């Protein structure tokens, strides 16, 4: 339990780091997360933040395990919050 909480805290800190270092537009928030505090980032960034391998992230997108959205320019962004909450399922 304490180990999980530590990990979540670290992810939160990294989230802010990612958002602050993202150039240009404001961070996109996930529509599907009720709390409204879930950032959506590119899978590459999500991999850096969550330490989940990139191909695992793409797989969880394909299987709709996580929230994701296609942006106007055709790239995919993924919900960090759902990714961290489902990481136990995809971390195998
Ligand atoms: Zn979400």
Image (spheres, grey):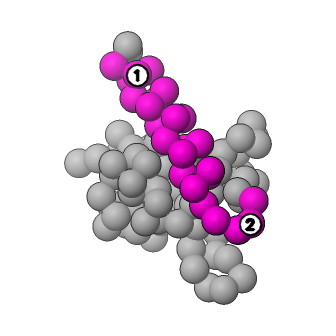
What element does badge 2 sit on?
loop
Q: Residues within 10 Å of mark 1 (few under 14, many from 20)?
A: few
| Residue occupying the far top of the picture | 2
Above or below: residue 52 compared with residue 68: above
Q: Position of residue 48 (x, y in %)?
A: 39, 54
In magenta stretch: residue 37: no
Q: Is residue 68 visible?
A: no
User: In percent of the image, x 44 and y 20: which residue is there?
Assistant: 5
| Residue occupying the far left of the picture | 92
| Span of residues in magenta | 3-26
Report which residue position mark 2 lands on.
Answer: 25
For residue 64, the mark is none
Of circles 2 and 1, the one toward us is: 2
For residue 6, the mark is 1
What element does badge 1 sit on?
helix
Q: Residues within 10 Å of mark 2 (few under 14, many from 20)?
A: few
Location of the N terminus (image quadrant): top left
Above or below: residue 6 compared with residue 48: above
User: In percent of the image, x 39 and y 57: which residue is there?
Assistant: 47
Mark 1 CB lies closer than 8 A to ligand 1: no
User: In percent of the image, x 34 and y 19: which residue is there?
Assistant: 3
Q: Nearer the viewer, residue 64 or 6?
A: 6
Q: Position of residue 69 (x, y in %)?
A: 64, 69
Instruction: First in sequence, mark 2 or 1: give its number.
Output: 1
Q: Position of residue 86 (x, y in %)?
A: 45, 44
Asked if the residues shown at circle 2 and circle 1 are in contact, with their CB atoms under 8 angstroms apart, the answer is no
Would you say the magenta stretch is mainly helix, strand or loop?
Answer: helix
Gap in angstroms between the C-alphas marked 2 and 1: 30 Å
């Amino acid at each position: 339990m304490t180990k999980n909480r530590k990990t979540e805290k670290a992810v939160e800190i990294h989230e802010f780091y990612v958002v602050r270092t993202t150039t240009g537009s404001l961070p996109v928030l996930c529509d599907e997360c009720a709390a409204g505090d879930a950032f959506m980032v590119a899978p590459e960034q999500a991999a850096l933040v969550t330490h989940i391998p990139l191909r695992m992230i793409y797989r969880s997108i394909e299987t709709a395990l996580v929230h994701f959205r296609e942006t106007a320019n055709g790239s995919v962004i993924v919900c960090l919050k759902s990714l961290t909450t489902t990481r136990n399922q995809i971390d195998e």
